[in-house]
Amino acid sequence: TVTIQGQTRHWRQYTAIDTARQPARRVTVVMDLDARNALGRDIAEHIARPALVVLPLVALLLAWALRKGLAPVNQLSTDIQALDLAHHQRLDGQHRFDDFSSTVSAINALMDKLDAQVQQERAFASDIAHELRTPLTAISLQAHVLIGTDDPVASRTAALSLREQALHAGDILAQLLAFARAQRQGEGDLQPVCLAEVLRRVVAQHAPRADDTGHALPLELPADADRWRLPGRPLLLELAVRNLVDNALKHTPAGTLVEVSLGCTEDTWVLAVRDQPDPTQPPSSTSVPPSTGLGLGLTLVRRIATWHGARLEIGTAPPPWQHSHALVWPAQAL
């Protein structure tokens, strides 16, 4: 700080000393800090004053542009919120903004999937109600018979029918519980599953029952079946196979050959449960595959198959087989 003629000024000094010369030389440069600060203030004022006028206008224009640009997005959001799945509503595919065409198509595709799932669940709930109504109605009728009759033969007959219908209702509820359990477990992680081991386990579990009902229950596997693995959930796959075997043993007459097999073609892997009628019995006049009423067990099998990338095929089989229930995977699935 230097005071000259009564005025105090602020200076900054830079000095370089050359010691290589004798005597040493010193060069000093001084800078007027007050003048530098005054220049800085002048530059800032010339920039800030116009900016104070221009920036609000720019902010308003930017806000208007953003609102204008987001208006289609907001309208699309409003249209999505207004969709009513119960009335099969969809977004207008002829959107005036081409950039949203793929988004509108994806949303409509999602709505179609949700609609199909809702319809499936409604049909399933209707089937359950119809299936349960039959045994419950029979139970009510047989209960009235038991109350209103003194005939011991009629009472015994009604009691046996009552027990049979109660067991039937219990079987339906057991299938529903298995269905719900399978849906929860279907969300777990996949692990390598050996289908040959699953089939051996299910056939071994059902062998005593097959012997009691007079069925033959062979298992046919490829020589290298133990090498192959399917990404899946072993409990659910075992549940699916068990339902197929249960269905075959329950709805075919004694003496029927029920074969469980796993085979591979060029394009597919096929896990099949097929039945061959007893050749000593007269041939059946129907070609409809056996099923459990409305097929709650088969509905469960179909849902498990879908979770594992397979499809359930039900139909007649080439001779000597009569009916076939098969889970079919692409060849590359295993």
Image: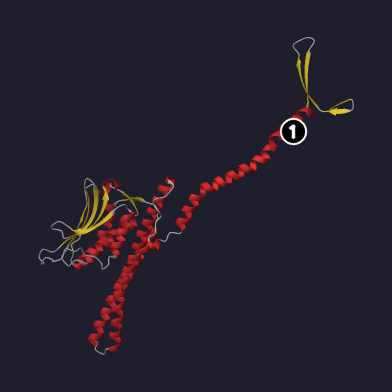
Query: Is residue 32 toward the left or the right of residue 128 in the image?
Result: right
Residue 229 image point, x, y percent: 30, 48
Indicate the position of residue 185 as horizontal and vertical percent values: 38, 58
Residue lying farthest to the right in this orientation: 6
Q: Is residue 164 visible?
A: yes
Residue assigned mark 1: 41
Q: Quadrant of residue 295?
A: bottom left
Would residue 186 be visible to someone looking at this image? no
Amino acid on which disc 1 is placed: Arg
Residue 284 lies in quadrant: bottom left
Q: Residue at x 59, y 44 (%)?
A: 61
Within the image, what quadrant is residue 53 found in? Answer: top right
The relative height of residue 217 versus residue 126 in the rendered view (above or below) is above
Q: Position of residue 40 (x, y in %)?
A: 73, 31
Instruction: Point out residue 208 in the picture as x, y percentages from the top left corner.
Output: 23, 65
The residue located at (64%, 40%) in the rendering is 54
Nearest the camera: 306 or 151?
306
Kind of element beneath mark 1: helix
Residue 141 falls left or right of residue 284: right
Q: Is residue 316 above or below residue 4?
A: below
Residue visible at 23% across and 67% down? 250
Q: Residues within 10 Å of mark 1 (few under 14, many from 20)?
A: few
Furthest toward the bottom, the residue is 150
Tell me: 76 left or right of 276. right
Split into 4 quadrants, where in the image is the N terminus? top right
Count of marks, rendered view: 1
